Structures are given as structure tokens and as C-alpha cells.
Amino acid sequence: MEQVVNVISEKYPCRKGLIQKLYQLFGDGDPFPPAVYLYGHTSTGKSSILQAFLPLLEATTKHAILNAIECYTNKILFETILNRLEGHVPCAANGYRSLTSVDCMKDFVAQLQRLPADRNYILVVENAERVRDMDHNVLPILLRLPEVSGLNICTVLVSDLPFEKYFIKTGLSPVVKLFVAEYSKKDILVILMNDFELVRDQLRMELESNKNAANLSEEELDKRLKILSMLTPDFYENYLNIFLNVFFKVCRDLKELQLVALECFHKYCEPVLDGTIPPDDVTRLWRNISKTMKLALGTIYMRMGNVNQELLRPMPITVDGQTSSESVEQMQTMKRLAQNLELPFYAKFLLIAAYLASHNAAKQDKRLFMKHHGKQKKRLQSVNAKAKVSEKMATQLGPKAFTIDRLLAIFYAILDEKVGLTCNLLAQISTLIHLKFLIFSSGEGTIMDGSARLQCTVGMDFIVHIGKMVGFNVRQYLCDFF
């Protein structure tokens, strides 16, 4: 047991407790539990650890890993399970046919009963919440496969939702629940520190490949490579501490943090490789990287490839005495980001409507979006309320939660043309959520029934440029500027 746990823990640190629990369930030779529910937030290592752990049991156990998003019908789900348990791969040689045709639950159970009973079987279903949308008997049967097939088989459901979201009127069989907690700041630091050698090698390769573009002489290149080889893990740890102090409160997704940490590290190392700042001068290095990290905060979830690198290198701009160069650079950055972001026409209006809903009070909607809203009495209290300082402005206090109904009402109010409420329109709301432009504040995963409450995460400069692209004046519909 210790050997298996140690092998996987070296590859996936800070998850030793989860690996030990999995080994206790599947590696001791005891009969498997009928079903295991593995849940937790995204990017916490659930699927990766299973994919590393299950091949170590190949001597006695066959496993099948499938994604419920790909298996969108019962027939595809059943045939995929049987194909992978038997090791059958549809290809050109067999005409891309499945091992056998399975049209209903009865046929699926009959095929399972034909499998050798002297082997153990583990079925892993990722994005298991999609199984709820299938026929009503699919999920109950998956939780009772040992009973209906007579095999030592276990179904492992992997999802982001708690198991209470699966309950149905007829009830479900009990399952073993394993919760995978989010990585702490200390855990993420340990994981990112494992990438030090890889990051340094990648930086070395970029220096060598961009030698001509940067107009570096052989002597200067050798000097930089020598400084790079002298960088210690302590230098990288100091950088990661600075990086996590900025980003950890905003993002807990390990994959996104790894990507942005790599992009910012290149900028962090530039003055060190130039020789302008010594590697141990943390204060000056922080001052040099602070603007870059501030810009990277606005693009952390967007995954826009080379655009991110361009955003982290603001173009030199000459300005007059009234506007600071930093603010102009930030405006230019947001403008380039908005221009490079490819969103459908209606999705841009939905994003604008979401921003207006997040930064306007609901009681002001009638005055802002209706032509005949009645007269507003001027009282001393309302006059004093309009004399806002910057700290009290809604655009400075942060986004507020709003409902889907209010979002759609504002969307139809600001859109000049008439558009029906179609599935395509609702799908664009889901796209904005997937891009992290909108986030759930409550009722996660319940967009269709209207009970979800959302928040808009984009900033003022970004939404103003989006509005200019579609010919809409955002400031005209904000209470702070009314």
C-alpha cells in the first residue's frame, strides 16, 4: 500500500489522504462498495488521481473511464461501458462498430452478466451530474450494478455537485462519499514549486529561440543563460509567494494559476537577466512586476493564447499632463482585450445587461430602462445621495447579485430589435458563465428554472469598450453617471 501511495503522491502532492482512501476501497482485495461518489470543486485532482491510480490495479481489476457529456444517450452510454471494459476500440478495421448493440437497460445488464466473474471491475463516470438528464432508471441501476449483474463491480461517480442534488422521489441506494477539498494556499505553493525545473528549462529555450528577435549578441545571451542557471528554488519560491498573495483570493483553479504564473514569471525574470535588479532584491522585483500582475488579473480566465503575452507588455504611449501613462496603458490594454475577444452579437448585449444589473439597484430599473416611468420628486435626501464620493459609487463597491429574469428584462430593454427567448439565447448565458464573465452567487446549476443568482466579474473599462463595439453607451445607463 505504502509503495502505491508514495508513487502517486510524488506526482500529485497534497492528496495523500485521498489516495489512501481509494486504496482502502479498491486495493485491499476486499469486495468493492456498490458505488462511490467523488466530488469537489474543479481542478482539485479528482480525475487525474483516478487515472493514475486505476492502472496500478490492472493485474486483478479492469476499469473503464468515460465522460457523461460524450455519452448523451442511453445507447451510447451502455455501449461505451461495455467497449471499455472489454478493451474493444471502434476503428476503421472494424467499421467503427461497438462490441455489441445495446438498446435498453435489459440488454445492458445481460451483457454485464456475461463478463468473467473472476475479475474485478471499476466504472468511472466523469461529469456524473449529466446522468440525471437520462432515463429515470439509469442512475439507480448504476448505483446497484453488483446486485443486478452478480459481479464485483463498483461505479465511481465524479462530479462538482454534492450528492443531495441527485435525490429523486423513489430514492437512491446509499453510496460512499469522498469529498475532495480545495487546495489551500500552502498546497498550491508546494505544487507550483514542483514546476521550477520545467519553468526554468522553458525560459532557457525561449531565450535561445528568440535570440535574433531580441537582438542579443552571443556574449549577452551567454550572460543571461548563466544568470538563469544560477537561479535557485528560493528565488522561485519568493516569486510564488508574491504571485499567490495577489491571485489566490481571486482564483483557486490550479490550472489557471499555473498558466498565469508561467506568463508572469517571464516578466519577473527580465530585470534579473538584464542585470538591473539582483535576484535577492525582492522589494524592487515586486515593484517591477506589480503592474504586470494587475493587468493579468483581468485576463486570468480568458485563455486567449498569445493575447495574454501582449497584454502583459503594454505599448509605450505618450500622453499629456492631464492623464497618467499608467491609466492610459490600462485603457489601451482593455481596448485590445475587448477587440480580441470574439463573442456573438447577442452575447455582448447579455454581458452589458449583466454589468448593468450588477452595478445598478433593482429599484432604479424602471427609471433607467422605461420611457414612461413617472416624475421623480426631488427631495433633499435624494439630492444629497447623488453627491457621491468615489468610495460610495456602485461601480467602485463591486458587483451585486441579480436574477436571470432581471438580466433578460434589461437585455430586452437595451436591445433595439425584437428577439425571441430561445435555447440559443440561454446557451449564450451559459457560455458567459463558462468564460467566468458571470459567476454564481447562489443556486448554482439552475439557470433554466430562474432561481439562480449571478454576478458580473468584468470591469468598467472592459464593458465600456464592449459597448462601443456594438454602439451602446454604457455610462448612460449607470446610476453613478445619471
Image: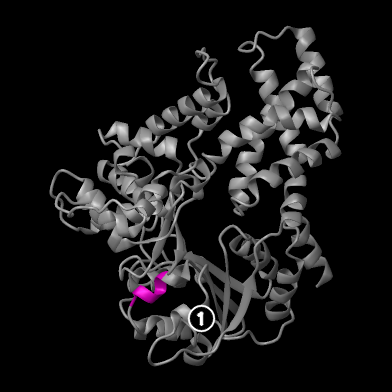
Can residue 432 be seen at all in this image of the molecule?
yes
Q: Residue at x 42, y 69 (%)?
A: 443
Q: Write down the region rendered in magenta.
A: 130-134
Check disc 1: other Cα within 10 Å, few if <14, some if 14-19, many if 20+. some
Q: Is residue 198 magenta?
A: no
Q: Is residue 252 left or right of residue 315?
A: right
Q: Is residue 419 left or right of residue 211?
A: left
Q: Residue furthest front?
A: 380
Residue 258 against residue 82 in the figure, above or below: above
Image coordinates of residue 158 in percent, x first then y, are 54, 70
Image coordinates of residue 473 in percent, x first then y, are 29, 36
Quarter of the image where one finds residue 3: bottom right
Q: Residue at x 24, y 57 (%)?
A: 409
What residue did someone put label 1 on? 115
Residue type at mark 1 is Leu
Give the overall secondary structure of the magenta segment.
helix
Residue 284 against residue 187 in the figure, above or below: above
Please state, as top left, top right, bottom left or bottom right, where the N terminus lies in the image. Answer: bottom right
Q: Is residue 133 magenta?
A: yes
Q: Residue at x 40, y 31 (%)?
A: 340
Indicate the colouring scheme: one colour
Image coordinates of residue 247 in percent, x first then y, are 64, 46
Q: How many marks?
A: 1
Image coordinates of residue 180 in percent, x first then y, are 64, 69
Q: Nearer the viewer, residue 273 or 108?
A: 273
Q: Nearer the viewer, residue 364 or 299?
A: 364
Quarter of the image where one finds residue 166: bottom left
Can residue 263 be seen at all in this image of the molecule?
no
